[in-house]
Amino acid sequence: MSGVREELRDALADERRIPRPPEPAAMVIFGASGDLTARKLVPALYDLAAARRLPMGFAVVGVSRTKMSHEQFRQRLRGSLERHRAGGFSEEVWESFSRSIFYLPGDSRRPETYGELRGLLERLDAGRGTGGNRIFYLASSPSLFSPTVERLGEAGMSREGGGSYVRLVVEKPFGRDLESARRLNADLLRHFREDQIYRIDHYLGKETVQNILALRFANGIFEPVWNQHYVDHVQITVAEDIGIEGRGAFYEEAGALRDIVQNHMMQLLCLTAMEPPVAFDAEPVRDEKVKVLSAVRPIPEERVEEVAVRGQYGSGWIWGEEVRAYREEEGVAPDSATETYAALKLYVDNWRWAGVPFYVRTGKRLPKKVTEIAIRFKPTPHTPFARAAGAEPNVLVIRIQPEEGVSLKIGAKIPGSGFEVGSVNMDLLYGTAFLEEVPEAYQRLLLDLMLGDATLFIRADEAEAAWSILDPVLRAWSGAEDVPVYPAGSWGPAEADDLLRRDGRGWRRP
């Protein structure tokens, strides 16, 4: 009997590991001729097709103003796949997947485009078995988000019926400030329900970002010390060694605060600081994230200089190559005051984190590409070892890129006579610890989207709460003409070091 029970247990475990297949659907991508579609969305869908995770009834419909046929669109995407996809290319997978790709030339601002789109989708329902399910993906310029949604609503394409679903995907940025974010959310909610809207931040699709929650809430040793009694401070770093990569016009409008801090870094802050959700489901997880953002101490506009630093890269050297200054980049004004570096000191004023500073920084043309969260614990109250000068306080580092993993710095005895203590790292590298290949972020998020799981997507109040924190900083910086310049290849302006030095701390060197 015990053998039967073991076989039954194993069978049930195998059944739990079998992923639930998504329902048939047609995914309409507005802005389909852009880089996002070619570099991220279609490669992710191709990988899902290779893993047999797409439904049998599936279709991709690209919509943009560029004149192309179905076949020309497919060949364009194939070329991009072969150039940019890290893994190998399978002719067999492409042959099968490409039959689900279609294209409609049209202006998303013109009502007649939606009549043509409706006709194509109805033909795909009949020919591809897409079942009336619709996913509308806004991969176009943010200025087209509201007009596209309005046209979808006017055409009756936001309404669900007959057991089918309609979902809307909105790429970041979710507005340019709090006021524009509220206007965008109001425009979306005029035609779609909140549970139909999926605001996507690809950082939340990264396995290491999701593992922050697993590290905290699946291991009993961390949660008891994850609070102001034991944590001295937290540092969140998103550093890039590249410049603006030919996106001068975009970056002049965005800057580091809008491009990285408002979305990616606020999400990392939330996952680090949030309380345990009652379940790993969309609403409990997002409720806890909103609570964190609501608890962040407001920054008075007149005191921004005390807690926020910006900078702009000058010329310098990266990996032995001389690079030009930001103001010398194409599309950048010669007197630009746009920040390519931003650092802030934030406080989460709640019971768990009272008095613990969260230092966040991001910048371009820094010495290396790295994204990490470093939790520095308080030192021991007393050490009995006379020669413990080399031992630093414990630091838990969650590395998100480029080498995903977790590192814990601990004190250990140095081999030899006597009792000298030094710091050593205990490292977990995901690449060697797990045999499974780590999926790309968009692969995970697109699958969750098709399954209707909104856990890793952003809710309206969450987006607005993040903007409310940074709005005073944006206003203060918008009126300033001078911005500190840091040499390319350095870790940012000296003012950023002062931000921590005033507290008796220093930035960690990744």
Image: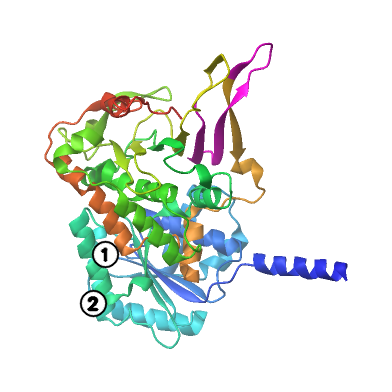
Snapshot quadrant of residue 113: bottom left
> How many numbered circles are shown?
2
**Would you say 80 lies left or right of 17 here?**
left
Provide the residue designation for mark 2.
111
**At numbered mark 2, what does the secondary structure look like: helix, strand or loop?**
helix
- 419 part of magenta stretch: yes
Snapshot quadrant of residue 365: top left
The stretch of residues the image draws in magenta is: 393-421
Q: Residues within 10 Å of mark 1 (few under 14, many from 20)?
A: many
**At numbered mark 1, what does the secondary structure look like: helix, strand or loop?**
helix
Provide the residue designation for mark 1.
145
Q: Amino acid at mark 2?
A: Pro
Q: Amino acid at mark 1?
A: Phe
Locate residue 194, reporting x and y percent.
Answer: 33, 71
Instruction: Name above or below for residue 150 compared with residue 498.
Output: below
Q: Looking at the magenta stretch, what is its main secondary structure? A: strand
Closer to the camera in the image, 503 or 65? 503
